[in-house]
Image: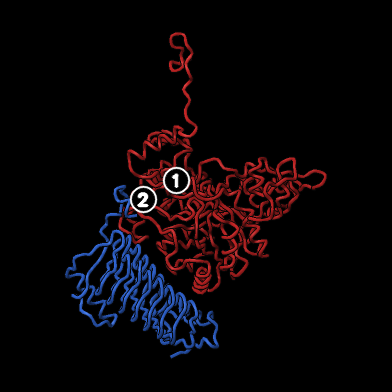
Amino acid sequence: MNEINKPKDGIPQTAPIKSATFTDPINAEIRRAAATGIYDIRGGGAKRKVPHFDDLLFLGASISRYPLEGYREKCETSVTLGTRFAKNPIELDIPITIAGMSFGALSGPAKEALGRGANAAGTSTTTGDGGMTPEERGHSSKLVYQYLPSRYGMNPDDLRKADAIEVVVGQGAKPGGGGMLLGQKISDRVAEMRNLPKGIDQRSACRHPDWTGPDDLEIKILELREITGWRVPIYIKVAGARPYFDTTLAVKAGADVVVLDGMQGGTAATQDVFIENVGQPTLACIRPAVQALQDMGMHRKVQLIVSGGIRTGADVAKAMALGADAVAIGSAALIALGDNDPRWEAEYNALGTTAGAYDDWHEGKDPAGITTQDPELMARFDPIAGGRRLSNYLKVMTLEAQTIARACGKNHLHNLEPEDMCALTVEASAMSGVPLAGTNWIPGRNGDY
Amino acid sequence: MQTLDMATTELREVNSTLQSQKADTNQRVWEVINPKGSHAIACGLDGPIEVTVRGSTGYYCAGMNKEATVHIDGSAGPGVAENMMSGTVIIEGDASQYAGATGHGGLLVIKGNASSRCGISMKGIDIVVHGNIGHMSAFMAQSGNLVVLGDAGDALGDSCYEARFFVRGKVKSLGADCEEKEMRSEHIEILKDLLERAGADAKPEEFTRYGSARTLYNFNIDNAGAY
């Protein structure tokens, strides 16, 4: 018994109860806002608990399904992206790509490691706000060039060097919001690439400057194809906002590939209130997007890449079973490189946080030397070792996904289907369109999205 | 002069022919006839050629231009010379929205008027408009020069960075963090050169210079009302 609820004068006291509404973190944030006058800015994706792939299970094979022999019978993992219009679609060995992350948000060596790891695993990596660096192009055999609202560092030479172009309309961490790179990370080189004064807070536009709606976007894509000779695939990346309609409009505008990023998808930096309160969970976005493709007769003709909270081979398999052609990872790739590693715990503590919770990437003080432009911190990170860790991780995820697919009797990851799964919760069942475990019930299923 | 007739030639062939003319080409002068408002004409050029489009164009004419001189003998649709890197684009008529958007270099001359968002997010391009420009022009403009012989619409230069704006006529309103600036001798020289290159009959001394007040470069809660 502690001093607080110790009987007073022999009378038992009411135990102090903290509010479930005004929690310690909420109260701390109120005090922080009152003291500083600025909203909380951080990196990463939504931390709140939302229905996710963990709420789905695979059924596996039994009498009614025939499994494949692990390690002996082939389970293919390759994927071709951009088969609709591009002369040169992208051929990947594994359906796990590296999502767009900028030089600026990440250090040059970290970008190099992403390229090395992706190469070794037979997949692609992606540029970000700020343009393409020579190191990045040099270390990525398949590089997707993001075409962003800010157009920082955007030039036709780099556009023509890309293996695919990703027109970024939205990002899961901040649907409707633009990028942000605070002054601490605007080094000389970053400032030069972005044509901005050093040390300012750089806020990227939330809308493209020279098109507004899907009809304009169709013409913009025509221009991009004309400039690149119709050679490379054009992806359109949308946030998990209105996936049925956004996918429909992206296909209408001429996309070869739709990239769909749910709210667990990370960002280099934006307002916490945005990350946690805008957008839909990844799990809720996939089936409407797939339904849109199916309604247009474009499923598997326009490929769907899903991102936002992909961590394991099981997540990969589940996203693909729901209808995705591939997935993209960002936060998980950074963790594989060494982000938030407990080996730096003392330094995380000195920054007022702990390994696994560090998200002030915008401050440029990353002890792991990944989300920084500080030369001393960057020097801690070895891009060769980091690349090896990433390729190991990508290969493990692929093996895990293959293990599940074989158990479901599938000789290609693309053959996984919703019927291979059940949902553990009513919410996950409703969102994913997969029956609740032990039933054939899918709540709310009336065919509409 | 080589002629490409869009009445009989597909856009892809027109552009691939023009795009394949590099620095050592001896076919330096081209005309495109019967454009009929087509989109993306003469985009992605990458060599020192001269192209005259005889008529009006749709979206993104001369987009991402490098080195080439593109002359539009008519009016231009949205996004003309967007993200231009170098070279010159001259429009005899008017230009629609987003003219010169995000341009990194080169000179864009609009002999008529330009619509809204002219020079949006410009990153080093020089733009000279003989007539007026619409609202929200030079929004988030980073660098380069925007010269307007006529009037400017609402919210000129909103949230701009280091770009310079020279307006001879009236400015309906300035955007957030854009202010009138002193016209110093170096600005007179810049303006004189631009007016000369754009064939504009005006004196630098008749213009007022505008640019960033730099109060929004780093966030401050006391400026929240400006966002």
Q: Can you give x and y, in whole percent of width and height, for residue A256 in the image?
A: 59, 65
Identify the image quadrant of residue B118. bottom left
Residue at the extreme bottom: B1
Question: Is B58 or A300 nearer to us in this picture?
Answer: B58
Q: Can you give x and y, in whole percent of width and height, for residue A343 in the image?
A: 46, 36
The answer to whether residue A300 is visible is no
The answer to whether residue B73 is visible is yes
Which chain has been coloured red in this picture? A
Numbered disc 1: secondary structure: helix
Palette colour of chain B: blue
Q: Earlier in the sequence, mark 1 or mark 2?
A: 2
**Chain at numbered mark 2:** A
Are there few (<14), some (14-19), or many (20+) residues within 10 Å of tag 1?
some
Please indicate whether residue A185 sits to the left or right of residue B59 in the image.
left
* Residue type at tag 1: Val
For the point 82% across and 44% down, the residue is A63
Q: Can you give x and y, in whole percent of width and height, for residue A148 in the image?
A: 45, 61
Please indicate whether residue A391 sits to the left or right of residue B120 in the image.
right
Question: Is A125 or A431 nearer to us in this picture?
Answer: A431
* Residue type at tag 2: Leu
Residue A182 is labelled as: 2
Label 1 belongs to which residue? A273
Q: CA distance from mark 1 to mark 2?
A: 17 Å
